[in-house]
Image: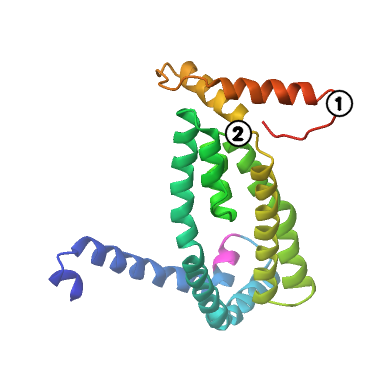
């Protein structure tokens, strides 16, 4: 009745159609052996499959607690990074604007006000290095997170706790790598590259190249012959 009172008849009809479609599907599963026999399958295997399906129907309720725990954990974890997500959007805008206006020192200061996983991702986006950020995220989750979750959750029989520990390991590795990239970022070169991108896109750049930018780049190039300096472009 709530669907009619709220003028949401389409949502109510879709739920009704889903309910009507589930009835024949349930009958097909319950009598799957007979349907398999009609398809000329092996009778013994068909009846065994029917018995297996019938015994598996009550086991669907066994995962009710685990599913609820996963939902509660996901909703709770979302509260943790909401604040960092807002800071990430702000730092991404500030870093890109300051680099485009010729203030690399201000961009560097804004970045180091607060640094976390989400904020570091915003820094990478603001510098126009989305490919590197995507590579770090994929590598941390697929190389560290998923194997750790499988090892702890299924091999070590830690269950849901093991799955979340593996996810936390991936986040820690991602956080560490992004912080290293952020610390070793050459902001003078990022300013030059930002102006080059604006010129290639056909947008006029209101920022003039300060002489200090060229002095910093020339000084680094002179020092590279005598000492090794690590910087990520």
Q: Is residue 82 left or right of residue 187?
A: left
Circle 1 — which element?
Answer: loop
| Along the line of sight, the residue nearer the viewer: 175 or 163 | 175
Disc 1 from disc 2: Cα separation: 22 Å
Membership of 36 in magenta stretch: yes
Near mark 2 (Cα within 10 A), the count class, few <14, some 14-19 or many ≥20, is: many
Q: Tell me where residue 207 sits by quadrant.
A: top left
- Name the residue carrying label 2: 187
At 41% across and 69% down in the image, what residue appears? 22
Front-most of 179 and 80? 179
> Can residue 60 be seen by looking at this rendering?
no
Q: Looking at the figure, which quarter contains the C terminus? A: top right
Can you see residue 4?
yes
Please report the residue visible at 68 percent of the width from the left and 77 percent of the height from the top.
159
Q: Which residue is mark 1?
A: 226
Give above or below for 100 relative to 50: above
Per the image, label 2 sits on a secondary structure element best described as helix
Circles 1 and 2: CB distance less than 8 Å?
no
Residue 18 or residue 83, whichever sits in front: 83
Q: Is residue 107 above or below residue 227?
A: below
- Quadrant showing the N terminus: bottom left
Q: Is residue 166 above or below residue 197?
A: below
Q: Position of residue 81 (x, y in %)?
A: 50, 62
Q: In x, y percent, where is residue 47?
A: 64, 74
Residue nearest the viewer, comparing 173 with 43? 173
Q: Between disc 1 and disc 2, whose residue precedes?
A: 2
Left or right relative to 159: residue 188: left
Write down the region rendered in magenta. 35-39
**Whole-percent x, y for residue 68 in the image:** 51, 78
Q: In the picture provided, is 8 more to the left or to the right than 75?
A: left
Q: Residues within 10 Å of mark 1 (few under 14, many from 20)?
A: few
């Amino acid at each position: 009745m709530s669907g009619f009172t709220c003028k949401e008849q389409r949502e109510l009809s879709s739920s009704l159609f889903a309910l009507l479609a589930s009835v024949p599907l349930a009958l097909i599963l319950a009598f799957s052996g007979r349907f398999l026999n009609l398809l000329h399958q092996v009778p013994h295997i068909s009846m065994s499959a029917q018995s297996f399906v019938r015994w598996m129907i009550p086991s669907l309720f066994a995962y009710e607690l685990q599913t609820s725990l996963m939902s509660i954990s996901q909703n709770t974890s979302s509260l943790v990074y909401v604040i960092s997500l807002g800071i990430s959007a702000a730092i991404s805008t500030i870093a890109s604007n300051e680099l485009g206006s010729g203030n690399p020192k201000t961009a560097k200061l804004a970045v180091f006000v607060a640094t976390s996983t989400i904020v570091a991702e915003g820094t990478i986006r603001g510098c126009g290095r989305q490919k590197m950020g995507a590579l770090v995220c994929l590598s941390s989750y697929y190389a560290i997170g998923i194997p750790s979750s499988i090892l702890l959750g299924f091999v070590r029989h830690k269950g849901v706790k093991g799955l979340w520990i593996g996810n936390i390991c991936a986040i820690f590795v991602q956080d560490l790598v992004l912080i290293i990239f952020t610390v070793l970022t050459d902001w003078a070169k990022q300013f030059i590259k930002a102006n080059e991108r604006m010129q290639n896109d056909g947008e006029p750049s209101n920022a003039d190249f300060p002489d200090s930018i060229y002095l910093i780049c020339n000084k680094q190039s002179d020092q590279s012959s005598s000492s090794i300096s690590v910087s990520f472009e």
